[in-house]
Amino acid sequence: MALMNHLFSSLVRYIKNGILFYWSSFFILILIEFFIGGLFSKILTPENYSLYVNVLNTLPFYSILVNLGISYSISYIIAHNPAIQFSFLKQSFSIQGRWYLLLIALHLGICIIFSHAYFDILFTTTIISFTYAYKLNLTTYFMATGAYVRAAISNTLQKISIAVVIAIIYYSRDLQVVVNGHFKPVYILFELGMVIFYFTLFPGINRQIISAAKVNYRKRIYSFGKYAMLNNGLNVLYYTLITLILRTSQIETHLQIIIGLSILFFRYTAVSIAPVFATMGPQLTKIRNNTALVRNMYKKYLALSIAFAILIMLGCMFCFSFIINRFYAAAYHDLPGYFTFFTYLIPLLFLNSFHGTFLSAIGKIKTTTIAEIVCTLILLCFLLWNFLSPISNYQIINYMVCIHLVVKFIILSAGTLKNISK
């Protein structure tokens, strides 16, 4: 009875302060992604849809690259000193804007020198990544100031707006012809156009950022952000490397799309556990010097991670086919059969996320960095192998993903056990 009362009071508290709404926004995003991907699979030609899937798989890395770890700086510094929030945001967006323009110039030069379809994909990804980096900074700012409802709105606004635009296109044959005929510029325009919605919905925030006093926080931004950028960037770089291997292989276009979608949905499953880890991190940091409390929290969240992993794995086994058959074009209804392999890797994905978050929260970021560097080098070796002898069997891609996850699991698990057994 006492446990039920505790759970009920916690639920009421989370509803009142908006944390539950923020957690829910992650699940809303997944549903929206299924909706957008399903409509696009029916609207776009296979070539355009392949471009879209490849962009989505390279976007996580480029969002972090453009962000420069600034969201981490915002989360840490503004949470401790709200008085400097708007001046700090002004400096952050200024640095990010200049870096973004430089990246565009560099990628444009690469596209001109090397005429390859994959560099074209990276250039497209670079352009639209600004919207995602801007959204991440704004969402992080709301989280740092305890405005969880606004953080949830910021977290979902972009995708909701895109879903509305794509739904309009879906019901207009003329618009579908225009989109397929000029997909890259049209896609870039309505992705970047989503920034307008943020200016419209949060005019006060943006006005205060623009009018804030100019203060130089550059060193503080870099000092807090560089490690977060390195670890988070390497953590998602493997999606970009796998996409590059896929794109430069001799696997037929349809299977490239199918495997690309499988990796995309595999990545989406981790969203279900992400809010839990976001809550765990700050709690763990506060008690990191108390080994007994750290060990108890580790056991608690390990059990939770395994339970979530099994639940999501079973959900994918029994519900994934229904979702694909309901939302996606008939040409992609063979996807569930290929996704089965990734379904069994979900526990590894969840445990790696848990151990990585755990080690970072107790200040052992060196271990996570080593894991990311080793796993990235493994994928670079696979990439070199593919360049020398292009892959024609899609199953090799599956094994690459599996090897990457297993090696990361071994390194992170060993580092975790070493620290909690002291």
Image (cartoon, rainbow, N blue to C red):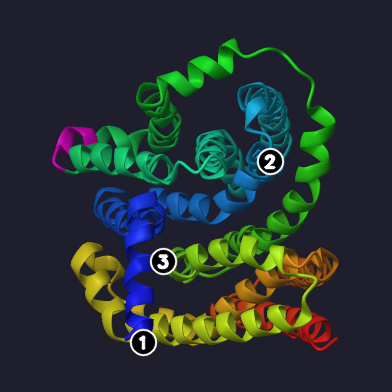
Q: Quadrant of the N terminus?
A: bottom left
Q: Visible in this render: residue 93?
A: yes
Q: Mark 3 — residue? A: 254
Q: Is residue 298 above or below residue 30?
A: below
Q: Residues within 10 Å of mark 3 (few under 14, many from 20)?
A: some
In front: mark 3 or mark 1? Answer: 1
Image side of residue 144 versus residue 339, left or right: right
- Looking at the figure, which quarter contains the C terminus? bottom right
Query: Residue 331, position in %: x, y?
Result: 27, 67
**Residue 249's spot in the image, x, y percent?**
61, 66
Q: Residue at x 38, y 59 (%)?
A: 14
Q: Secondary structure at mark 2?
A: helix
Residue identifier under label 1: 314
Mark linked to residue 80: 2
Marked residue nearer the N-terminal end (3 or 2):
2
Tell me the chief SS of the magenta region: helix
Q: Is residue 414 left or right of residue 296?
A: right
Residue 174 is inside the magenta segment: yes
The relative height of residue 239 versus residue 101 in the rendered view (above or below) is below
Q: Amino acid at mark 3?
A: His
Marks 3 and 1 sit apart, C-alpha to C-alpha, by 27 Å
Disc 3 secondary structure class? helix
- 124 vs 148, nearest the viewer: 148
In the displayed structure, does residue 167 sit left or right of residue 69? left
Counting every numbered tag in the picture gives 3
Q: How far across and how far down the image is residue 91, in percent? A: 70, 23
| Type of amino acid at the residue the image marks with label 2 | His
Mark 3 or 2, closer to the camera: 2
Start and end of the magenta stretch? 171-175
The crowd level at tag 2 (other Cα within 10 Å; few <14, some 14-19, many 20+) is: few
**Residue 169, image x, y percentages:** 22, 38
Question: Whole-Å distance between the Cαs marked 1 and 2?
Answer: 41 Å
